[in-house]
Image: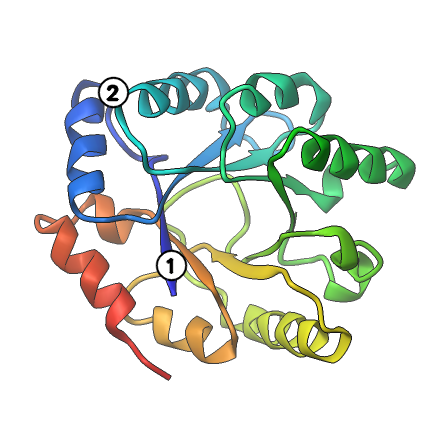
Amino acid sequence: MEISTSILSVKKENAIQTFYNLEIAKTDYFHIDVMDGKFVAQDTSNLMLEYAQTIKHISNIPLDIHLMVENVENYLNEYLSLMPAYITIHYESFKNKTKLEETIRKIKQEGVKVGISIKPSTKVEEIKNYLHYLNLALVMTVEPGYGGQKFIEEMLPKIQELKLYSEKEELDYYIEVDGGINLDTIQKVRECGCDIAVVGSAIINSEDKKKMIQDLKSYKV
């Protein structure tokens, strides 16, 4: 189990020290929640780009970019230039599925791993045609847009479905889960087949970030 720490709630005045503390605490990724104020209500686009650029200069921990935006093309090049580990796009951002396929190809051609994320209302069935081309499938276990929300347990079968499908089709994508993950809920997502857990508030608000990350990782199936 890997941990991708969401820095959505990091205060600007504490940002560099927090990033340093998270690196010392051995987070596996910095999770960058890019929101445009249209796809979701909150607009974090300028702050998240600033944070991502800062991290790229001061840390070797890879970036895990999550684009919660209506027009992916407007944001793609600036994040591709940072050479993150992953860029994850939302299935729901694309009315034109040909454009979705082109975007997947573009990200992979730039040497970056690509993921697709689905909102709680979107069924796994809708993205099965794309899973053969993906490195990552992200299940939202809250409505995207804000940190600190309550985990939606009804999303657990989606994780199981993605896990079973990858085994049946012999596919090689990771399953990432994002939303409401803490010490109480991480066991549930791990048991269902989660490979990467996105954790925000539980780590950022912890006085001992290293111990929190160790505790999150320590659960064994």
* Residue at 47% across, 64% down: 195
* Residue at 36% across, 76% down: 187
Amino acid carrying label 2: it is Lys
Q: Residue under circle 2?
A: 12
Amino acid carrying label 1: it is Glu
Mark 1 → mark 2, Cα distance in angstroms: 26 Å
Q: Residue under circle 1?
A: 2
Instruction: Specify whether residue 141 is in view.
Output: no
Residue 47 screen position, x and y as percent = 40, 19
Instruction: Tell which of 20 and 67 is nearer to you.
Output: 20
Instruction: Tell which of 144 and 130 is nearer to you.
Output: 130
Residue 61 screen position, x and y as percent = 33, 38
* Residue 43 numbered tag: none
In the picture, which quadrant includes the N terminus? Answer: bottom left
* Residue at 21% across, 41% down: 22
Residue 7 horizontal side relative to residue 42, left or right:
left
Residue 195 horizontal side relative to residue 12, left or right:
right
Colour convention: rainbow
Instruction: Specify whether residue 42 is in view.
Output: yes
Which label sits in the foreground, 1 or 2? 1
